[in-house]
């Protein structure tokens, strides 16, 4: 297997052309569906060697020559380190999750998924307009890369607030429980020390209701457990799937399209 | 026989002449001092005098012999029918009752007397005040290595004459004496030596010229520095341990700040951590046998805590946004995180750039197209 392809920003790569890559938003995301340790370890070593090469380019200030693509050495370094972390996490059994599916909305422009912390099962998006500018508050505190997924929803709520001259919010609660096996998996993930915040993503099946005051909608759901992973200083964080159980249809679709999931190979 | 007649005639002549001389009438009256008068003036002279004013009802001038308490005597020629005639003043020697007697010799050689009684009870006004120690003063020491403390004593006086003041600390030191000058403003007196820390009352008393005593006193306390205070004293390079406490405070807060910043990187948590640590320090001071705590708390900690807590409240009230999405017109949409969020920096994203990197993706659940997935 030619590992060089791992480092190419193969913009035109099609899902059918390779089982390594999946085109997501114009960038190549490595999806090593092969969970074989030897395969992953070999690729990690290969990526590491390539990182060392690029680092020499960075020191010299030259561009890293990539086929058909102008990419600075620093950009290449970011990409390679992200790939390396992705492989390392996959080797540990934590597949990458691209959290963009959180921005999915229903016909009423309200989110499909709510993102919860493991300590609180309440989710709320509230907006306010005023002299302080447009402000959005999401509870729980989300990683900025997760919070930004709710930007379209926030703009929708802000528009409602401006037109109605009142502040709006939406909220929901998760009334389910995490299975014991998932709890153990979470504990194992915590012990690795690789994860920062952990979140539970649950599909909001019942329709959201926009309200001027916060109101909790009780719902039962079956979540995904993800955690943020720090790649390194200056590199964007990644998100990995820690566990899941009794997925809904949309959650399964989200996993298939946005995660390297050893349990749901595409 | 002839001789007998001469004697009888002479006797008749003498009897006749005797019966022709009229009897002398009159008296000396005292206008000042009056009978029963009480003189309360506080004379400053050693031998104060009061005027002696008399009247006479004699028809002729009379040399009147005055005596004071039957001891001192002087004479005064009182005119006939004199009204309020001044005679030599009367000298007062000691407070008490006085009797002035006026003796007049009549023409027939007899002596007539009149007298007046009065009292001199001077009312001396004034007071002795302590300049040092001050009321409720807490006296510490500069650690001289000996378990004693000389308490500086300074007094002021509003008496118009010098006063010998006797002063002492209740049962812990021998009484001392100090000559306090008249109208003294700040007169230094011998210090009082204490050997046991505690609260004391220092009392000064002085005798008035009427024999009574006036006293004044204040309460102060001596709280020598503890070992902790002395350590802080060594750190402060001043005569007060406050500087040392402040240095330790700054050090602790600095360490907490650095640690909190290294661990969390969140300025709100740093501020809250510092406030909590300061509050704990303030709380612990109330349980430590430290004398510097009062100054420490009063001078430094309280305002510092107020500032820190105000900053914490401000940051909770106006939290720093963790994410800003800036629209094409430049207006921001701020995603406000909890003040206790562990986010270090604010992520700022251009909405235009965000939209460019969005791709349309049909909701697999059959939802409306148009939702976007950011990179």
Image: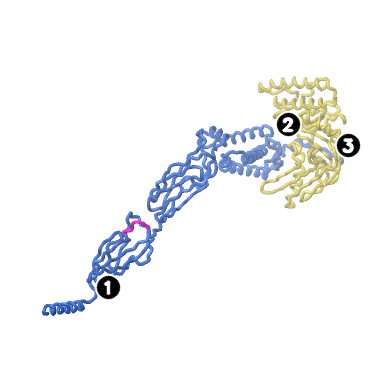
Q: For mark 1, name the chain.
A: B
Rounded to the nearest angstrom, the CA distance separating label 1 from label 2 is 131 Å
Q: Is residue A157 above or below residue A93?
A: below
Is B239 positioned to the left or the right of B14 in the image?
Answer: right
Residue placed at 74% from the left, 48% from the top?
A159
- Local crowd size for mark 1, using a 10 Å CA cut-off: few (<14), some (14–19), many (≥20): some
**A115 within the magenta span:** no
Quadrant where the C terminus of chain A is found in the figure: top right
| Residue range of the region highlighted in magenta in the rendering | B90-95
Q: Nearer the viewer, residue A37 or B37?
A: B37
Looking at the rendered structure, whether the residues under marks 1 and 2 are on a common chain is answered as: no
Q: Is residue A9 above or below residue B315?
A: above
Rounded to the nearest angstrom, the CA distance separating label 1 from label 3 is 140 Å
From the viewer's perspective, is the residue at label 1 or at label 2 nearer? Answer: 1
Query: Secondary structure under badge 3?
Result: loop
Query: Which residue is under mark 3?
Result: A246
Disc ID at residue A31: none
Dot 1 and dot 2 residues touching (CB under 8 Å): no
From the viewer's perspective, is the residue at label 3 or at label 2 nearer? Answer: 3
Q: For mark 3, name the chain.
A: A
What shade has chain B been given? blue
Disc ID at residue B26: 1
- Local crowd size for mark 2, using a 10 Å CA cut-off: few (<14), some (14–19), many (≥20): some
Residue placed at 83% from the left, 31% from the top?
A185
Disc ID at residue A236: 2
Q: Nearer the viewer, residue A82 or B120?
A: B120
Q: Earlier in the sequence, mark 3 or mark 2?
A: 2
């Amino acid at each position: 297997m030619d590992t060089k392809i791992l480092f190419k920003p193969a913009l035109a790569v099609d899902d059918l052309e390779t089982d390594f890559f999946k085109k997501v938003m114009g960038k190549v995301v490595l999806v090593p569906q092969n969970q074989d340790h030897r395969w992953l370890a070999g690729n990690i070593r290969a990526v590491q060697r390539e990182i060392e090469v690029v680092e020499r380019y960075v020191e010299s200030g030259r561009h890293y020559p990539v086929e058909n693509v102008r990419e600075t050495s620093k950009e290449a370094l970011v990409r390679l380190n992200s790939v390396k972390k992705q492989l390392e996490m996959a080797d540990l059994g934590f597949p990458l999750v691209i959290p963009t599916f959180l921005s999915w909305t229903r016909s009423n422009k309200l989110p499909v998924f709510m993102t919860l912390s493991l300590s609180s099962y309440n989710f709320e998006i509230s907006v306010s307009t005023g002299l302080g500018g447009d402000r959005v508050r999401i509870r729980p505190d989300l990683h900025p890369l997760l919070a930004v997924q709710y930007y379209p929803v926030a703009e929708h709520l802000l528009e409602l607030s401006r037109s109605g001259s009142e502040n709006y919010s939406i909220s929901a609660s998760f009334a389910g429980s995490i299975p014991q096996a998932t709890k153990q998996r979470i504990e194992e993930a915590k012990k690795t020390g690789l994860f920062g915040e952990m979140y539970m993503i649950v599909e909001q099946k019942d329709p959201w209701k926009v309200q001027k005051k916060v109101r909790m909608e009780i719902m039962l759901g079956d979540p995904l457990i993800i955690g943020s992973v720090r790649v390194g200083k200056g590199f964007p964080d990644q998100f990995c799937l820690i566990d899941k159980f009794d997925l809904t249809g949309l959650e399964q679709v989200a996993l298939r399209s946005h995660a390297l999931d050893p349990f749901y190979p595409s | 026989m002839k001789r007998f007649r001469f004697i009888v005639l002479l006797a008749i002549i003498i009897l006749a002449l005797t019966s022709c001389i009229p009897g002398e009438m009159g008296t000396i009256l005292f206008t000042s001092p009056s009978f029963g008068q009480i003189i309360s003036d506080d004379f400053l002279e050693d031998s104060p005098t009061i005027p002696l004013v008399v009247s006479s009802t004699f028809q002729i001038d009379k040399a009147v012999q005055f005596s004071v308490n039957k001891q001192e005597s002087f004479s005064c020629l009182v005119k006939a029918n004199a009204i309020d005639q001044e005679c030599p003043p009367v000298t007062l020697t000691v407070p008490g009752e006085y009797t002035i007697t006026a003796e007049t010799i009549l023409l027939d050689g007899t002596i007539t007397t009149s007298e007046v009684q009065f009292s001199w009870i001077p009312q001396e006004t004034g007071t002795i005040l302590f300049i040092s120690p001050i009321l409720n003063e807490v006296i510490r020491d500069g650690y001289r290595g000996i378990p004693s403390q000389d308490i500086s004593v300074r007094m002021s006086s509003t008496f118009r004459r010098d006063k010998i003041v006797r002063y002492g600390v209740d049962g812990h030191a021998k009484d001392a004496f100090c000559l306090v000058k008249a109208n003294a403003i700040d007169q230094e007196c011998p210090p009082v030596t204490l050997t046991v820390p505690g609260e004391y009352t220092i009392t000064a008393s002085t005798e008035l010229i009427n024999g009574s005593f006036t006293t004044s006193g204040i309460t102060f306390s001596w709280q020598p520095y503890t070992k902790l205070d002395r350590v802080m004293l060594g750190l402060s390079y001043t005569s007060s341990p406050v500087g040392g406490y402040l240095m330790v405070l700054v050090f602790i807060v600095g360490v907490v700040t650095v640690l909190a910043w290294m661990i969390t990187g969140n300025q709100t948590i740093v501020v809250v951590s510092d406030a909590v640590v300061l509050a704990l320090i303030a709380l612990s001071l109330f349980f430590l046998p430290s004398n510097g705590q009062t100054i420490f708390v009063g001078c430094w900690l309280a305002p510092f805590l107020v500032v820190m807590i105000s900053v914490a409240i401000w940051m909770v009230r106006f939290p720093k946004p963790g994410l800003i999405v800036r629209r094409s017109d430049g207006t921001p949409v701020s995603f406000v995180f909890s003040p206790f969020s562990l986010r270090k920096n604010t992520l700022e994203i251009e909405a235009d750039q965000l939209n460019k990197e969005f791709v349309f993706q049909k909701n697999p659940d059959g939802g409306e197209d148009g939702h976007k997935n950011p990179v």
